[in-house]
Image (cartoon, rainbow, N blue to C red):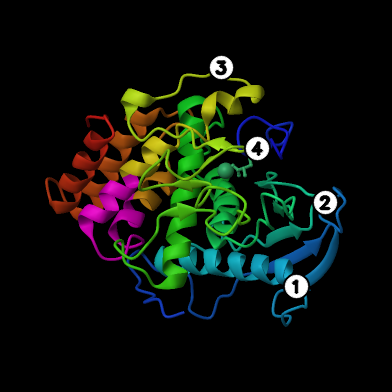
């Protein structure tokens, strides 16, 4: 395959740790309206030394480089959602500076969070374009940092798939917020801008319909299940995506989609708030939480914020049941 790894994307050799929208405030607001993010975007100039050359610091004007500006804007959108919607100042809740590097490596078909910063490849140009094109992918990588500072979910097996899914949830929420979309208007796709025309597929993943994002002679077929009956059991090693963390994430992804669409409106409001509370409340879930443990914690979070046996809890239990998890 073009990436040389298993499946559609070359996962890094060693696993790294780890306009028009209505900006409605639904959570506790702890971030002053005057606060701003602290972004810096670097250019690796096709090499792999990090962070590379600083090309755009906070407050500086757009550059002539689309990758730099897409990364800068994507970091900004993610920071805005965390701050304005959920009242959290950056990944650590204390204004952590946001670092990104673009033009990482040559024809690099991926993006990642290395435990300290986001890194984006340009894609090979044959199957993939630059990985900053999709704002949800920028937010996905940033969200790995949020998970690192909060729930700390171990990146293997079910907790790993929950870690991946949480990044897709934040990614999609940021995409929807930037576009001002309701749950019905949203496409629920991750990486919809990353494929070249040659690829038979619409995106890297679909949260609404896992397993249907692509089916291509070269890239293969989207391997994601959307129900526990189809859970993919893989060895828990790096050659097998740490037990299919990017595969089985389809199950909690679809649970979130079912939950958000049952509630209607904007997904970042009640549905997103329940996921945010679950991920960021100390002691809510252990680092090695499995799907059932996580699902139970979302119910607790929903009860705390929206009351017991209400509409939100009802929608949530039905959503989990819809993917084969009874809580
Ligand atoms: N793009 C992948 C991700 O963020 C890279 C990785 O860490 N396996 O999940
Ligand atoms: Zn990820």
Give the CA distance from mark 2 to mark 4: 16 Å
What residue do we see at 48% from left, 79% from top? 33
Residue nearest the observer in this picture, 208 or 172: 208
Secondary structure beneath label 2 = loop
Question: Left of 37 or right of it: where is 268?
Answer: left
Q: Indicate which label's residue lies in the foreground, 1 or 3.
A: 3
Q: Are marks 1 and 3 in contact (CB under 8 Å)?
A: no
Q: Nearer the viewer, residue 44 or 232?
A: 232
Tell which tag, 2 or 3, sits nearer the viewer. 3
Above-or-below relation of 18 to 263: above
Residue at which label 4 appears? 17
Q: x, y percentage for residue 250?
A: 42, 38
In the rendered structure, the answer to whether residue 22 lies left or right of residue 8 reads left
Looking at the rendered image, the quarter that the N terminus falls into is top right
Dot 4 crowding, Cα within 10 Å, few <14, some 14–19, many 20+: some
Give the mark, 2 or 3, whose residue is nearer the N terminus.
Answer: 2
Q: Which residue is mark 2?
A: 50
Q: Nearer the viewer, residue 75 or 219?
A: 219
> Which numbered disc covers residue 235?
3
Magenta-span inclusion, residue 243: no
Mark sitting earlier along the chain (2/1)? 2
What residue would you read off at disc 1?
A: 57
- Can residue 227 be seen in this snapshot? yes
Count all numbered tags in the image, as a single digit: 4
Q: Earlier in the sequence, mark 3 or mark 4?
A: 4
Magenta highlight range? 256-274
Label 3 to label 4, Cα distance in Å? Answer: 19 Å
CB of mark 3 near ligand 1 (< 8 Å): no
Q: Residue at point 53% right, 63% down?
A: 78
Q: Quadrant of the C terminus?
A: top left
């Amino acid at each position: 395959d073009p990436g040389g790894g298993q499946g559609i994307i070359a996962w890094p050799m060693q696993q790294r740790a780890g306009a028009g929208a209505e900006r409605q405030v639904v959570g506790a607001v702890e971030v002053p309206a005057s606060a701003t993010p602290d972004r810096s975007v670097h250019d690796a100039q096709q090499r792999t030394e990090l962070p590379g050359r600083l090309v755009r610091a906070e407050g500086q004007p757009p550059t002539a480089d689309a990758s730099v500006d897409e990364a800068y804007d994507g970091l900004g959108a993610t920071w805005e959602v965390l701050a304005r919607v959920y009242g959290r100042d950056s990944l650590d809740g204390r204004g952590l500076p946001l670092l990104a590097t673009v033009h990482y490596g040559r024809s690099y078909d991926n993006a990642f969070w290395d435990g300290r910063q986001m890194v984006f490849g340009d894609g090979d140009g044959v199957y993939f374009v630059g990985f900053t094109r999709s704002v949800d992918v920028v937010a996905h990588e940033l969200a790995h940092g949020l998970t690192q500072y909060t729930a700390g979910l171990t990146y293997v097996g079910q907790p790993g798939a929950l870690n991946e899914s949480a990044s897709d949830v934040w990614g999609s929420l940021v995409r929807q917020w930037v576009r001002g979309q309701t749950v019905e208007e949203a496409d629920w796709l991750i990486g919809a801008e990353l494929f070249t025309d040659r690829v038979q597929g619409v995106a890297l993943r679909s949260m609404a319909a896992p397993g249907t994002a692509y089916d291509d002679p070269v890239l293969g077929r989207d391997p994601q299940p959307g129900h526990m009956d189809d859970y993919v059991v893989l060895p828990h090693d790096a050659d097998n995506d740490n037990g299919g963390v990017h595969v089985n994430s389809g199950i909690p992804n679809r649970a979130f989609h079912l939950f958000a669409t049952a509630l209607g409106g904007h997904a970042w409001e009640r549905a997103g708030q329940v996921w945010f509370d679950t991920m960021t409340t100390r002691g809510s879930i252990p680092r090695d939480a499995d799907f059932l443990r996580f699902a139970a914690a979302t119910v607790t979070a929903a009860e705390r914020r929206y009351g017991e046996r209400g509409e939100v809890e009802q929608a949530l239990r039905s959503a989990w049941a819809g993917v084969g998890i009874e809580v």
